[in-house]
Image (tube, helix red, strand yellow):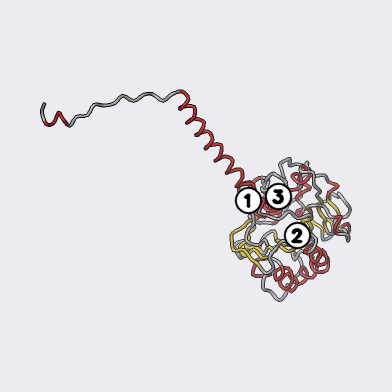
Amino acid sequence: MTPSAKLVKPVKSVKPRSRRTATAIGSAVALVAASAGLWAATASTARAAALPAPDHIVVVVMENHAYSQVVGSSSAPYLNGTLIAGGASLTQSYGITHPSEPNYYALFSGSTQGRVDDSCVTVGGFQSANLASEVIAAGKTWASYNESLPSQGSTVCSSGKYAQKHNPWFGFGNVPVSSAKTFAQFPTDYGTLPNVSFVVPNLCSDMHDCSVSTGDTWIKNNLGAYAAWAKSNNSLLVVTFDEDNSLSGNRIPTVVYGAHVTPGSSSSATYSHYDVLRTLEDLAGTGGHAGNAASAGDITGIWS
């Protein structure tokens, strides 16, 4: 036998895995895959679970002012001295587009719904999901309170300082027209408020036609008592703007105030109306996300 031959070792035959072993491996792979899916679902749920669950959320939409025109301005002592100082400010919050109306639709339904101007809409013309329809489907309550609206459920395009272009709920057939109330119907017993509501001041009170000071005073006089109540009654006030003055990259003020909000906090993350909508949906526990809110993120870094 040659020296090289002595180094050659016989090759052992490899037995095929038993059916039981293959089944076990398959089950393990399936378990890992299922666990990954469960982790993803749990992570998504945990993301929403990290938010508080307020009993009432009131959202106020103001008009046409940039972040720098309001935040830090001496013309807005209530917004700065009370709501921002005692609540949270989003320092990089942005509208979606110009002019006003598409932004209201974006904030309410996660889509501009093809709106490109401020014209009056066909009442009930859209059927897609929106914040109100999701809140109602979840068995919770919704309403809007619209200053200078002639009467509850009125579908008029304009009346004095009232403008339908700031009221996107009229565009959806899955939102009861009767849920659009006058601001005079905003309750003084805040415990009777719907779970989610929007407040839309008229064209003067919202800073569109009148000054920052006028709008700041309006919020203080009309919603200041609610804001104070919200702090100790598991509720929130959100103040945002539809768009800027077309001179600041559409950067707008957005303020969150009330229970579970860390006083004096801020978030420098970039948010749009779609992120605000998603956060409202998750705060309200709707279980769904309308339009672009599905791919948006929750507001973080401000919750106590």
- Of the residues shown, which amino acid type is indicated by label 2? Leu
Q: Is residue 28 visible?
A: yes
Contact between labelled residues 3 and 2, with CB atoms less than 8 Å apart: no
- Of the residues shown, which amino acid type is indicated by label 1? Arg
Q: Nearer the viewer, residue 280 or 62?
A: 280
Q: Residues within 10 Å of mark 2 (few under 14, many from 20)?
A: many
Number of numbered discs overlaid on the protein picture: 3
Contact between labelled residues 3 and 1, with CB atoms less than 8 Å apart: no
Q: Residues within 10 Å of mark 1 (few under 14, many from 20)?
A: some
Which residue corresponds to mark 1? 47
- Of the residues shown, which amino acid type is indicated by label 3? Glu
* Residue 76 percent across, percent down from the top left: 73, 72
- Distance from label 2 to label 3 (Cα)? 13 Å
Q: Secondary structure at mark 2?
A: strand
Q: Secondary structure at mark 1?
A: helix
Which residue corresponds to mark 2? 236
Q: Is residue 11 left or right of residue 39?
A: left
Q: Residue at x 74, y 50 (%)?
A: 284
Q: Is residue 204 visible?
A: no
Q: Secondary structure at mark 3?
A: helix
Q: Is residue 11 left or right of residue 38?
A: left
Q: Nearer the viewer, mark 1 or mark 3?
A: 1
Q: Residues within 10 Å of mark 3 (few under 14, many from 20)?
A: many
Q: Which circle marks residue 281 in the picture? A: 3
Q: Which circle marks residue 16 in the picture? A: none
Residue 207, quarter of the rendered image:
bottom right
User: Looking at the image, is mark 2 or mark 1 earlier in the sequence?
Assistant: 1
User: Looking at the image, is mark 1 or mark 3 earlier in the sequence?
Assistant: 1
Q: Is residue 154 left or right of residue 84?
A: right
Looking at the image, the residue that sits furthest to the bottom is 74
